[in-house]
Image (cartoon, grey):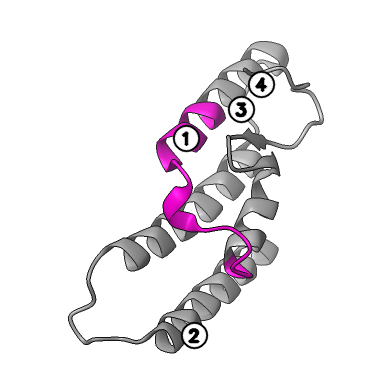
Amino acid sequence: MLTRRVRGARFEVHLDQFTGPFDLLLGLISKRKLDITTISLAEVTDEFLAYAQAMRAAEGALDLSAASEFLLVAATLLDLKAARLLPSPGGEDEEDLALIEARDLLFARLLQYRA
């Protein structure tokens, strides 16, 4: 399943619903071209852990930048998925949820650029 280069390669996800760069996954979900509820975050995490182990074996150390980027995007995806799956106590409508998601994505991007 993990047939990608390690040295100099960005982390890519290989799922039934999506194959490509991890940050692109977040972009597609934010544009509502992909439904977060169909994505298995456990599979994504397992793939990243395998990627990290391969990187550590090839280079002797884990790239902290790659790990930080993964954690930032994964946390944003987890937050989005929880918001979509859990019932909202305030009866938020779809438009309110979209505004919250957009705000969270902008915040995540800001943190990513700052790092």
The residue that mark 4 highlights is: 55
Q: Distance of mark 4 from mark 1, alpha carbons? A: 15 Å
- Residue 87 vs residue 31: left or right? left
- Nearest the eye: 110 or 18: 18
Question: Of helix, strand and loop, which mostly describes the magenta segment?
Answer: helix
The residue that mark 2 highlights is: 99
The answer to which of marks 4 and 1 sits earlier in the sequence is 1
> Disc 2 or disc 3, which is closer to the eye?
2
Q: Looking at the rendering, in which quadrant would you find the C terminus?
A: bottom right
Q: Amino acid at mark 4?
A: Met
Q: Is residue 115 visible?
A: no
| Quadrant of res 6 | top right
Kindly identify which numbered label has been placed on residue 45. 1
> Disc 4 or disc 2, which is closer to the eye?
2
The residue that mark 3 highlights is: 62
Q: Which residues are magenta?
A: 30-48
Tell me the element at label 2: helix
Q: Amino acid at mark 1?
A: Thr
Q: 42 above or below 62?
A: below
Q: Distance of mark 2 from mark 3, alpha carbons? A: 35 Å
* Disc 4 and disc 3 in contact, CB within 8 angstroms: yes
In the image, what residue occupies the spot 55% across and 54% down?
73
Q: 65 above or below 92?
A: above
Tell me the element at label 1: helix
Given the current orientation, which residue lies at the most extreme left position?
89
The answer to which of marks 2 and 3 sits earlier in the sequence is 3
42 falls in the magenta region: yes
86 falls in the magenta region: no
Q: Amino acid at mark 3?
A: Leu
Q: Residues within 10 Å of mark 2 (few under 14, many from 20)?
A: few
Q: 103 above or below 78?
A: below
